[in-house]
Amino acid sequence: MKRKYLQLGFFIIFIFIFLVSCGGSSMEGDDNGGGTTEPENVAAIFVEADSNTIDPEASTGVTAHVYNSSGGPVSGVDVVFTLSDPVLAYITNTSTSDSNGEATVTFTARTLPGEVGITATAESVSSDPETIFILDETEPQSITLEATPDTVIVQGTSTVTATVLGEGGADVPNGTTVTFTVDNDSLGTVTASSVTNSNKATATFEASENPGQVDITAQSGTAVSDPVTVMIEQAPAAFIEFVSADPSLIAIAGTGGTEISTIQFRVTNSNGNPLQNVTVLFEIHDGLNGGEYINPSDHGAEIEVSTTADGIAQCSLHSGSVAGPVTITGTIFDGVGDPLMTVKSSIVSIGGGVPSEKRFSVAAETLNLPGLNELGVETDITAYLADRFGNYNILDGTVVSFETELGLTVNSSDATADQSGTATVVIRTQGYGPEDVIPLSWETDLIDYVFTTYGYSMTNHPRDGLCSVLVHTRGEEHFDDTNANGVYDSGEPFLDTLPDPFCDYNDNESHDNGTTDPFELYVSADGSSSYNGVLNGAWDSPDADKMLFRNFKILVTGSPIICSNTATFNIPNGGSEAITVSVCDRNLNPLTPGTTVSITTNAGKVSGRINYTFPNSSVIGPDRDGHLGLIEFPFIISDSDPDETKPEIATITVEVYWEGGTYSLNIIGNVDYSAP
């Protein structure tokens, strides 16, 4: 805040020096001594926020300070506020400066994190943007690294795993980018970047032909890890190397998935030739104490195996009842029985094997489709699955079902998850648009506002264009494994969820039977003929044939409707006027991604929200003002040259480029207007 006031002070000093150097006579009246003064013109605007960092869905005050050329406040002028990204937040569009030259509005964040610039415009003058940061509680705050193995021979490899956590150990979103660097690339290289899944991102370090020591670090956002060290050693006369762990992800015992991973090491001489009949000691190095084992005779944690003709020794890791990472070491011995060399396997993850409620999410390639005007517009929609421990590739083959509200169709009602734990289908626009639903109070207020402000009458509202895609699969409810034994125990906290999935047409998060809003499609988990929407108060395991579901929202929108709050304007010499236009479809919704809005004039000057490209978003609301922030474009038309009196007829053109076509609205008025 101190920095902002210093900047303001420097600005006032500059104006004072400028006036002294120019004589400063503009306020002394005209040459005839009549005492007439010119109207105060805006010379500068300075914007500040009460808080520059706020949480999602929080609000803060924003004040524009309006000054004249003497550095004094200008009162009674319209100030238009615009945002760099209205999908992230919304703000009161227009305010009038008070006797202190201050115009104050409220800035409200939506649900997503990011940076939003606020610009204030009065007459023909615009402020520098003031930036507000919308926080994300899951922004990376800490990174820990592990290299497995941490000692390799020349030209060997090591798996580097970064564990990325948010504030207070919170999960970060899947897909968070992590970059890896090595301090000495003459000794080896590391994967440049990877993305997180269940807070972990992996990279591969490949050693060069030179022995030595390297430090590897990882970074995500502003979080930077401590380095992890990998030692690179010369190959001994006889040495052992890790070959594979197949598969690298297995299921907890008894969950129905693959429960065994085959671990292989190879023993060779100094020339790289395989050695046969060499004893290798396998040991579970990092275990979970969940009953996992490698010795089938006694379910033990170690076993000795001799190499085959190709130098391979292998064992089988059997999962237990606890999920997590396991590594195996392989050791060879010298002629007197002393350890000669020990290496680690890569990590084998033991997972739960079925989708978990808190690890189930949905995304689409395009979130706003022009389906009110065109049939057959397609986009991909994908379900992301993981088990309770964050493992996803164990869910290969899981069936996911997709069903849609009227207005969309899907190319397959069922899809099978692949090795990345994702199931994708194609949806397309088809039919007559989403179901009509009863407007909420904020939508009724919006309809009234649009009619009062723009004279545009309609009965449709934003949720008439919001279409639900029901996505469901079978899995288990989430629970907190407080004793880390890998199974649910009575008394442990769990997330109770509804038994029957339903397609939420009216977005109220409950099933409607058609008595008011439309009857909503549902799926009966137990095969009965009636909808079951009662929580059972018990943790539902995979044995309970639990159905998990999401309602994913797609906007189905139409062609542009452009309205202005005025049919004309008259701008006196040196004056200005605030105008607002709305650009939306027939349901008052934002237009499809890539649609552009441009506001220009052939006389005078326009300032404010005059250039905009609609983003890929299905955000609406959450209230009247929040929705107006998505579809309203406030700006100011002003006299661009107050020193010259030259009346002109001006045409303000609002041009919208949508889906390959151009739509426009002209507002005709006068600049340098003198009343007759």
Image (cartoon, rainbow, N blue to C red):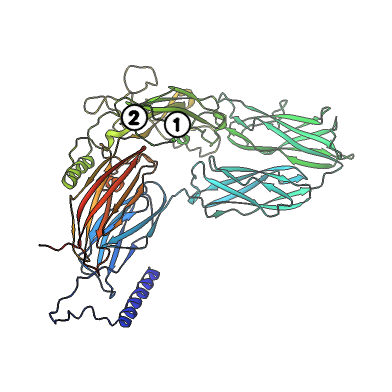
On the image, the x and y values in percent for residue 126 come to: 32, 62
Q: Can residue 331 be seen in this view?
A: yes
Residue displayed at 35% across by 75% down: 9
Given the current orientation, which residue lies at the most extreme right position?
335
Q: Is residue 57 left or right of residue 334?
A: left
Where the N terminus falls, by quadrant? bottom left
Q: In this view, does 497 lie above or below 341?
A: above
Identify the element where label 1 is drawn. Answer: strand
Q: Is residue 467 left or right of residue 192?
A: left
Please, what is the three-letter code of the amino acid marked with disc 1?
A: Asp
On the image, the x and y values in percent for residue 204 come to: 66, 43
Q: Nearer the viewer, residue 319 or 101?
A: 101
Q: Can residue 508 be seen in this view?
A: no
Q: Which of 518 and 354 is in front in this view?
A: 518
The residue where tag 2 is placed is 374
Residue displayed at 19% across by 70% down: 39
On the image, the x and y values in percent for residue 621 come to: 29, 43
Q: Distance between the residues labelled 1 and 2?
A: 17 Å
Q: Which quadrant holds residue 128?
A: bottom left
Please, what is the three-letter code of the amino acid marked with disc 2?
A: Glu
Q: Is residue 28 above or below residue 104?
A: below
> Which numbered marker is on residue 455?
none
Contact (Cβ within 8 Å) of mark 1 with mark 2:
no
Q: Which quadrant holds residue 158?
A: top right
Q: In this view, does 547 lie to the left or right of 122?
A: right
Q: Which quadrant holds residue 403?
A: top left
On the image, the x and y values in percent for residue 183 come to: 68, 55
- Categorize mark 2 by other alpha carbons within 10 Å: few (<14), some (14-19), many (20+): some
- Between disc 1 and disc 2, the foreground one is 2
Q: Nearer the viewer, residue 392 or 128?
A: 128
Residue displayed at 18% across by 55% down: 569
The residue where tag 1 is placed is 380
